[in-house]
Image: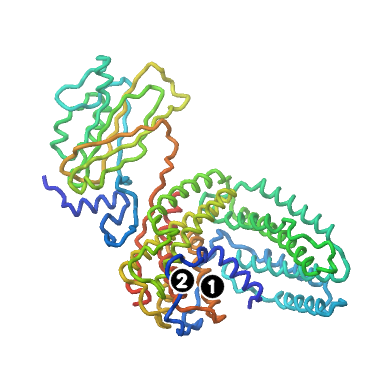
């Protein structure tokens, strides 16, 4: 099982990357006549993720490094910590125990990059426990932490200076280096000296623990970026720098995404409903909200990544915009033909989930499965998010059906979007 | 000549331009509309033959006689040629030069099946140290629906490689025969554009898949 913190962190990530554009629509209201529809996670079933998009096998040594380090950090905290403040002692003990219990727990993740992310989180927690314990027992780590931060920044700068997207083809450059780009961006964020280590760590031991944990997370993140790059290059005998090719492809796809998106410009950022039908209380309303919000948010995300030089990510996001626009077009046509406006029942949600799962699975089995897996990734987040909402009894059936309907339409556009992207990388 | 049906022409055009959803696919009474912004449709699936004559001769012309390259003003003007060929009759009205490059254009046009295709034929003078590249071909969709093919070709002009020996005084002639996978009964117009840069156009390619919505939302 995942810890509550990890679940919440996961939801936080999804809210940014998977559920973008969820501010209330300016038209209509959220009233639903279907509030009594009960849902269980069995009603929507479980989703098998497509194969990992990373082009080579990731060896267990990467996870083992995190596990060993996590164990080492926890070993420096006594199982029964002696801290004058009993509440602090209790929380340190509880957090330590929680993290210790995860040491032999294999994360339930389908992709090695996701598994590594889970282990970085555990390492972060372990370092946080140690940092909190040391602060609570009078050890001031401010100076050591500053040195560690500087060291990570130096290593990061060196890594980035050498990052020229070496790969055997532009396509593999996208697949191998997109997760590396993401790790570099994450590391840069984690290694910033804010929030600061407290000036009085005894008074604020948890703040101290958070600062220590964040630097440990930055180190772990950079280590994964380096090891993933080494792993990929170790499996390919002939590679060349693909940086320029990636920038060129990214630009071409940016133009394509922009032109394709312009076909639905009149359906984005709308003050009024573009439909004559009353969508209040229908799955169609949530579907349209999701489909249009996704395109708006993804366009912005791709722009930020291009500006930040993350061209592998921008290539994938261009494909996601193309699939998102197609999902929006199908949404518009469907609602105008009277679809997605009917009564929502447990059975209708279940059928929509079946179609979504089938579409997602098919997307990962067609040509270009690795690129398709990257492009279809947002629907995996949607499925996970909806499952969690149902499990926590927060789910509204109408919204769930709208979100799952979007996942289906989007996933069905993925094979064509993947082919479009791959052709422009050749 | 048996002309293809209008429906078939539209199908050919849809395939050629990559635009699956032609006008009329959504309810017109329910604005706004999905706008593919493709009234001036790019043809993606064309074939082209490109020739270059280094003597600067006239490659083809309408009528019985070709102007000679020695006729300075007239020859320079006559190097510009444009013709849309939608039938054997159109082809019969053209006269091609005797040089090998003109012959290659002529054979390309002759090999065309006008039941399913048309040819946009162009020639133009170019300075010896430059080259002209075809960048895109488009047709007026609305006119084509009325069986009137009005093509437009966009070119760009750029330096030839630096190791090409050439004189700034010399003029060559280039010719392009663009076989468009659309048929029509006539052509009442044509267009041509020339860019001074051959850098990629910022106009992006249009993506269109064929995802259809569920018939009843949560329905079967």
- Residue A36, percent from left and from top: 46, 85
Q: Position of residue A9 (x, y in %)?
A: 63, 69
Horizontally, residue A165 falls left or right of residue A152, namely left
- Asked whether B56 or A186 is in front, the reply is A186
Q: Quadrant of the N terminus of chain A?
A: bottom right
Q: Mark 1 vs mark 2: tell me if same chain.
A: yes
Nearest the camera: B167 or A34?
A34
User: How dense is the environment of label 1, judged by Cα within 10 Å: few (below 14), some, or many (20 and up)?
Assistant: many
Q: Are marks 1 and 2 in contact (CB under 8 Å)?
A: yes
Residue nearest the viewer, comparing B24 with A326: B24
Rendered image quadrant of residue B107: top left
Helix, strand or loop for disc 1: helix
Q: Which residue is mark 2?
A: A403
Q: Is residue B43 above or below residue B91?
A: below
User: Which structural element holds mark 2?
Assistant: helix
Q: Residue at x 51, y 81 (%)?
A: A41
Q: Residue at x 25, y 28 (%)?
A: B81
């Amino acid at each position: 099982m995942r810890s509550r913190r990890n679940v919440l962190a996961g939801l936080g990530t999804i809210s940014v990357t998977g559920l973008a554009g969820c501010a209330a629509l300016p038209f209509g209201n959220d009233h639903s006549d279907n509030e009594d529809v009960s849902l269980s996670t069995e009603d929507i079933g479980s989703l098998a993720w497509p194969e990992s998009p990373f082009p080579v096998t990731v060896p267990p040594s990467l996870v083992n490094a995190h596990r060993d380090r996590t164990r080492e950090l926890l070993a420096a905290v006594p199982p029964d910590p002696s801290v004058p403040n009993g509440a602090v002692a209790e929380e340190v003990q509880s957090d330590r125990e929680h993290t210790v219990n995860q040491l032999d727990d294999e994360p339930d993740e389908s992709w090695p990059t996701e598994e590594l992310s889970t282990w970085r989180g555990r390492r972060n927690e372990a370092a946080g426990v140690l940092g909190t314990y040391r602060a609570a027992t009078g050890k001031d780590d401010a100076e050591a932490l500053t040195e560690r931060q500087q060291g990570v920044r130096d290593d990061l700068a060196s890594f980035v200076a050498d990052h020229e997207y070496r790969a055997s083809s532009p396509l593999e450059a996208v697949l191998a280096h997109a997760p590396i780009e993401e790790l570099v961006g994450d590391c840069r964020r984690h290694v910033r000296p804010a929030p600061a280590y407290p000036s009085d760590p005894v008074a604020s031991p948890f703040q101290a623990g958070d600062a220590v944990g964040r630097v440990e997370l930055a180190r772990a993140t950079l280590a994964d970026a380096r090891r993933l790059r080494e792993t990929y290059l170790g499996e390919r005998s002939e590679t060349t720098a693909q940086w320029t090719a990636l920038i060129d492809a990214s630009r071409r796809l940016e133009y394509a995404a922009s032109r394709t998106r312009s076909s639905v410009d009149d359906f984005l950022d709308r003050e009024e409903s573009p439909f004559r039908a009353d969508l209040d209380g229908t799955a169609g309303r949530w579907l349209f909200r999701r489909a249009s919000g996704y395109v708006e948010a993804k366009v912005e995300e791709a722009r930020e990544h291009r500006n930040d030089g993350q061209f592998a990510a921008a290539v994938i996001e261009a494909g996601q915009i193309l699939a998102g626009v197609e999902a929006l077009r199908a949404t518009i046509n469907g609602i105008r033909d009277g679809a997605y406006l009917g009564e929502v029942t447990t059975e209708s949600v279940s059928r929509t989930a079946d179609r979504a799962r089938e579409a997602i699975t098919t997307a990962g089995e067609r040509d270009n499965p690795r690129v398709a897996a990257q492009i279809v990734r947002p629907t995996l987040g949607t499925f996970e998010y909806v499952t969690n909402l149902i499990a926590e009894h927060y789910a509204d059936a109408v919204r769930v059906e709208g979100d799952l309907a979007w996942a289906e339409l989007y996933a069905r556009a993925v094979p064509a979007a993947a082919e479009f992207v791959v052709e422009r990388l050749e | 000549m048996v002309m293809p049906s209008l429906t078939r022409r539209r199908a050919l055009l849809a395939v050629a331009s990559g635009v699956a959803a032609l006008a009329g696919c959504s309810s017109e009474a329910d604005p706004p509309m999905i706008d593919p912004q493709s009234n001036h449709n790019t043809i993606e699936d064309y074939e082209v033959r490109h020739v270059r004559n280094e003597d600067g001769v006239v490659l083809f012309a309408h009528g019985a006689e070709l102007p000679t390259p020695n006729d300075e003003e007239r020859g320079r003007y006559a190097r510009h040629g444009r013709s849309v060929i939608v039938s054997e009759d159109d082809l019969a009205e053209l006269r091609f030069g005797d040089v090998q490059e003109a012959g290659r254009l002529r054979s390309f046009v002759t090999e065309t099946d006008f039941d399913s295709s048309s040819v946009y034929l162009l020639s133009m003078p170019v300075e010896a140290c430059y080259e002209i590249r075809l960048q895109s071909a488009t047709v007026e969709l609305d006119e084509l629906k009325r069986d009137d093919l009005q093509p437009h070709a966009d070119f760009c002009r750029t330096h030839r490689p630096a190791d090409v020996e050439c004189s700034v005084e010399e003029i060559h002639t280039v010719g392009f025969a663009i076989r468009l996978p659309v048929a029509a009964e006539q052509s009442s117009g044509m267009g041509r554009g020339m860019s001074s840069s051959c850098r990629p156009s910022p106009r992006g390619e249009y993506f269109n898949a064929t995802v259809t919505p569920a018939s009843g939302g949560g329905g079967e």
